[in-house]
Image: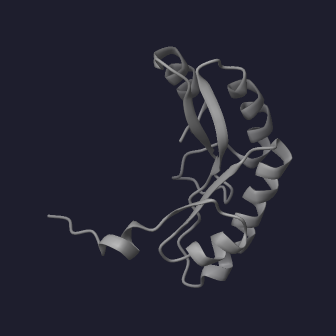
Amino acid sequence: SVDSVRLACILNGRAQKPLPVLLQVNVAGEEPKSGFAVEEIAAAAEEIMKLPNLQVKGLMTIAPLVDNPEEVRPVFRKLRQLRDSLGLEHLSMGMTDDFEVAIEEGATIIRIGRAIFGQRRYS
């Protein structure tokens, strides 16, 4: 995923062939998370789509960690609305704890590593 125009320009300059990318959007506006702000994604997407070696395929987000997956539904819904307004194909959103809500809101890509591989073990 690409979280800044600067990174997109670097990837574009180094790509040997067209590279499919997702644009990361910080829908919830969480301080420690990277990604485009909701209000800047349209302009950023337009700029990145002009880069010849990048193919913008969709948007992605990492929702806040919550106890009830329903609490992140507005985040997923907003990303879907942004994707639709940009005419893009993919939505990468939803992880092990909230993927069902993400699918209901239109996710085409989910990240459910913990559900498949189990809890990470750090040593």
Q: Residue, x 71% and y 65% (percent of image)?
A: 106
Task: List the single residue furthest toward the left.
Answer: 123
Task: Please report the residue visible at 57 percent of the width from the left and 35 percent of the height from the top.
Answer: 20
Task: Tell me which corner region of the image, top left, top right, bottom left or bottom right, holds residue 23.
Answer: top right
Q: Nearer the viewer, residue 109 or 35?
A: 109
For residue 52, what is the image quadrant? Answer: top right
Question: Residue 27: x percent and y percent?
Answer: 68, 56
> Which quadrant, please, contains the C terminus?
bottom left
Place of residue 28 in the rendered image (x, y in percent of width and height, measured from the top left): 67, 60
Q: How many marks?
A: 0
* Residue found 50% across the figure and 77% down from its top: 97
Residue that sits furthest to the right in the current view: 85
- In this rendering, position of residue 5 left or right of residue 11: right
Residue 103: image location, x then y, percent: 65, 71
Q: Is residue 60 above or below residue 120?
A: above
Image position, residue 30 (x, y; %): 60, 57
* Most distant residue in the front direction: 17
Q: Quadrant of residue 2?
A: top right
Picture colour scheme: one colour
Please tell me which residue is depicted at 68% across the width and 27% down the height of the picture: 48
Q: Is residue 42 left or right of residue 59?
A: right
